[in-house]
Amino acid sequence: MEIFQRFSLEAARRLPRLPPEHPCARMHGHSFQVEVRVAGALDERLGWVVDFAEIQQAWAPVHAALDHRCLNEVEGLSNPTSELLAIWIWQRLHPALPGLVAVTVMETANSGCEYRGDPSPKA
């Protein structure tokens, strides 16, 4: 069974590898929505996969590192595409959430990506 929790963060970024005329090469902001999915067996006694409070606790340091920041200034995010942001988040959540199966990053209401822990992501 899978459960999920959604979080939001506000952040600025620019994508430095794009041509200067591309709008995303300029500094701009997003109201990101991040969905964290965890899978596991249903605990028969408790009736859940994992306590949502555990997901919130794992998310808290990630949120503190990203919210109201310029993502380009966060170590490991010099080119903060949504894809690379999803990998960055996964790498920080997975140790605390061993049942993590997906991190979805929505940069707009209609655009986003999902990362499911590819063992060899390319940057």
Image: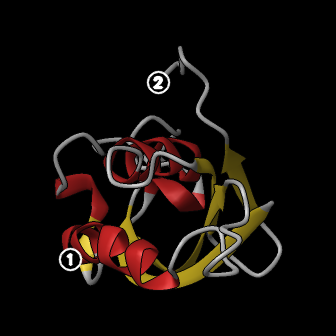
Question: Would you place residue 52 above or below residue 78 in this image?
Answer: below
Residue drawn at (36%, 72%) of the image: 59
Q: Amino acid at mark 1?
A: Ala
Q: Disc 2 designates what residue?
A: 123
Query: Position of 66 compared to 30: left or right?
Result: left
Where residue 82 appears, as percent x and y from the top left, is 56, 53
In this rendering, the answer to whether 102 lies above or below 10 is above
**Where is the N terminus found, in terms of image quarters?**
bottom right
Q: Residue at x 44, y 73 (%)?
A: 55
User: Which label's residue is closer to the chain start, 1 or 2?
Assistant: 1
Q: Which mark is residue 64?
A: 1
Residues 98 and 5: in front is 98
Measured Cα–Cα span from mark 1 to mark 2 = 24 Å
Q: Secondary structure at mark 1?
A: helix
Question: At 41% across and 53% down in the image, what residue appears?
Answer: 89
Query: Label 2 is placed on what type of residue?
Result: Ala
- In percent of width and height, residue 50 lies at 55, 70
